[in-house]
Image: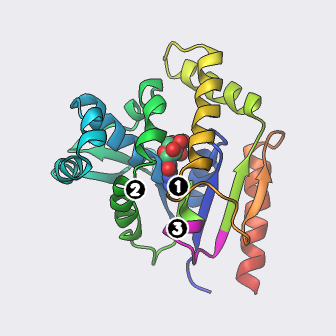
Amino acid sequence: MGKLTIAIDGHASTGKSSIAKKLAKSLGYLYINSGSMYRAVTLYAIENNLLELIDLDINKFIKKLKENKIYFKKNENKSISEIYLNKKNIENEIKSLRVSQKVSLIAAVPEIRKEMVKLQRNIDRTKGVVMDGRDIGSVVFPDADIKLFLTASPDIRAKRRHNEMINDGETVNFEDVLENILVRDDLDTTRKDSPLIIEKDAVVIDNSYLSIEDQLAKILALINQKIKL
Ligand code: C5P
């Protein structure tokens, strides 16, 4: 068996990107965080006062969006890829609450999804890829070799995300983080275009009480099983 395509979907703040990064590193695969692409579009819309335009004239917004470049570049020190918007590294900025509070509304717009899915499918999969998001196993790569669905209790997820934000120097309170997680899950699972669903062939991992190492071991075991088939 050649190099695999691994799709990791799941609820908000379930540590998809942490586990995907480690997995990609241990396999020598490319890692792509599709959520950061929707976050990049959101940051672009906020910074250029274009949120209203999305509602008023989506085609005009898409035209403007296409004049910009959203891409990933490898950070050689960390050996992972980071997201750029027009030559600016926006990896940290996109994680802020102001972006999180708008991103799921923007990600529900079909025209925006269409553009992002195009970029995601253009990625070279020949060397193996781990991509995380909400619709990777269902829409972007329905042919993925391994499909994982991560979940955990909302309270535990909010605690983890809150700690992460505080460590990154952001001033946020726990209730706002929890609320944002619940609202995003609701928007992501109820939207018409590409809602978050559990694919029939996905393996569900509830990581409420699992360490990253436990999860990694579990996933690597699944991969070994798959390779042997
Ligand atoms: O993965 P992350 O939480 O950073 O993604 C931010 C938001 O982008 C999600 O809450 C979801 O609304 C949206 N998203 C999506 N489809 C993806 C990845 C993310 O709709 N494949």
Check disc 1 and give the amino acid type.
Answer: Lys
Q: Earlier in the sequence, mark 3 or mark 2?
A: 2
Q: Position of residue 124 (x, y in %)?
A: 39, 72
Q: Residue 44's image quarter?
A: top left
Residue at point 69% right, 61% down?
148
Residue 27 visible here: no
In the displayed structure, 191 sits above or below 29; it is: above
Q: Residue 222's image quarter?
A: bottom right
Image disc number at residue 72:
none
User: Tag 1's secondary structure?
Assistant: loop
At label 2, counting other C-alpha atoms closer than 10 Å, the crowd grade (few under 14, some 14-19, many 20 or more) is some
Check disc 3 and give the amino acid type.
Answer: Val
- The quarter in which the C terminus is drawn is bottom right
Residue at point 79% right, 67% down?
221
In reply to whether residue 145 is colored magenta, the answer given is: yes
Residue 35 visible here: yes
At label 1, counting other C-alpha atoms closer than 10 Å, the crowd grade (few under 14, some 14-19, many 20 or more) is few
Q: Gap in Å between the C-alphas at discs 1 and 3?
A: 13 Å
Q: Position of residue 113 (x, y in %)?
A: 40, 56
In reply to whether residue 54 is colored magenta, the answer given is: no
Check disc 2 and give the amino acid type.
Answer: Pro
Residue lying furthest right:
209
Asked if residue 89 lies left or right of residue 208, the reply is left
Query: Label 3, on which residue?
Result: 139
Query: Label 1, on which residue?
Result: 192
In the displayed structure, 227 sits above or below 94; it is: below
Between tags 3 and 2, which lies in front?
A: 2
Marks 2 and 1 in Cβ contact (< 8 Å) = yes
User: Tag 2's secondary structure?
Assistant: helix
Extent of the magenta region? 138-146
Query: Label 2, on which residue?
Result: 110
Asked if residue 200 lies left or right of residue 17, the reply is right
